[in-house]
Structure formats: structure tokens, C-alpha cells
Image: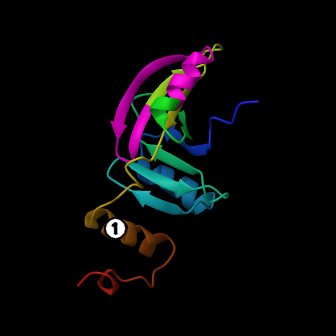
């Protein structure tokens, strides 16, 4: 039997048109913790500590992103097994991604983290601290980290 191609589900991306309202729903009402945020997207922790829910202004529907060791090699193996490559490989912030389709029409996004984990800038961290102050940890003060 061949070794499993997929390492884990990296994230489930959900299209939202109002990021603030979505954060209120998923964080405040459903209890998911904010992991990262930028101007158009936010990553929330799943209970398993590995998978994220990514809320964002997407130009397409929801998607499932699957972590693999190498997106290019995984796509080649997927295609050799009878699937097809729909798009990519493409460079993304953390590495490479390839969109594939199985014989039943299911699209999957294969991605690797060959460039490392997502890095955010100081503005993002300030925004996160503001978010945390309002929603969860009012005792956090920006001047605790920024002079």
C-alpha cells in the first residue's frame, strides 16, 4: 500500500462578505480563537490545534486546503493516479499550491509550507491586540509590546 499523500487538513476556507460580522459569529458565539488576521482574511483555530478556519473575502466558493510535503510532487502523484491538475503550481506566502480534481469532480487545494509559516507585520499584530482587547483580554495593552 502506498504512503498517505495528505498530511492533514490545513484549513477550511469560508467565503464571507463581512469579516467583522463573521469574526463575531465564529469567535464570540462559537468560541473559536483568532490565530491571525490581515485586511481581508482571518484564521481561527479548530479544536484540534492543527486545522484552521480561514474566513475571507474570496472570489470563489468555500475550499478545503490540504497540507502535503511538496505540492508539486503531490500533484504529480495525484495526476498519475488518475486525477487532474486544474491550476498551478503557484507561489503562495508559505510555499506552493496546486489545485487538483479527482475523477468525481472534487477540487482540492494541495499546499506545502516550503517557505515557512505565515509571517505577519507589526500592523497586523497591533490589529490583533486591538481585537483581543475588545473581545477576550481587555487587560492586554499595546504598550506592553510596543514602545
**Which residue is situated farthest in the right direction here?**
1
Residue at the image position 51 percent from the left and 73 percent from the top: 136
Q: Which residues are magenta?
A: 74-97
Residue at the image position 39 percent from the left and 43 percent from the top: 95
Front residue of 57 and 97? 97
Indicate the quadrant where residue 17 lies.
Answer: top left
Q: Residue 76 in the image: x percent, y percent?
A: 51, 23
Quarter occupied by the N terminus = top right
Q: Residue 144 in the image: x percent, y percent?
A: 34, 86
What residue sits right under mark 1 in the picture? Answer: 125
Magenta run includes residue 79: yes
- SS label for mark 1: helix
Q: Residue 66 in the image: x percent, y percent?
A: 56, 38
Quarter occupied by the C terminus = bottom left
Res. 57 visible in picture: no
Indicate the quadrant where residue 83 lies.
Answer: top right
Indicate the quadrant where residue 88 lies.
Answer: top left
Q: Residue 44 in the image: x percent, y percent?
A: 53, 56
Front residue of 142 and 68? 68
Magenta run includes residue 147: no
Amino acid at each position: 500500500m502506498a504512503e498517505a499523500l495528505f498530511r492533514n487538513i490545513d484549513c477550511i476556507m469560508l467565503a464571507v462578505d463581512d469579516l467583522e460580522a463573521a469574526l463575531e459569529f465564529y469567535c464570540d458565539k462559537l468560541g473559536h480563537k483568532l490565530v491571525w488576521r490581515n485586511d481581508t482574511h482571518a484564521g481561527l483555530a479548530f479544536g484540534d490545534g492543527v486545522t484552521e478556519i480561514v474566513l475571507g473575502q474570496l472570489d470563489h466558493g468555500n475550499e478545503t486546503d490540504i497540507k502535503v510535503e511538496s505540492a508539486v510532487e503531490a500533484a504529480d502523484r495525484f495526476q498519475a493516479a488518475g486525477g487532474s491538475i486544474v491550476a498551478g503550481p503557484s507561489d503562495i506566502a508559505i510555499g506552493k499550491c496546486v489545485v487538483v480534481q479527482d475523477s468525481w469532480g472534487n477540487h482540492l487545494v494541495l499546499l506545502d509550507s516550503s517557505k515557512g509559516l505565515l509571517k505577519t507585520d507589526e500592523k497586523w499584530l497591533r490589529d490583533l491586540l486591538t481585537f483581543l482587547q475588545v473581545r477576550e483580554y481587555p487587560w492586554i495593552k499595546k504598550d506592553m509590546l510596543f514602545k
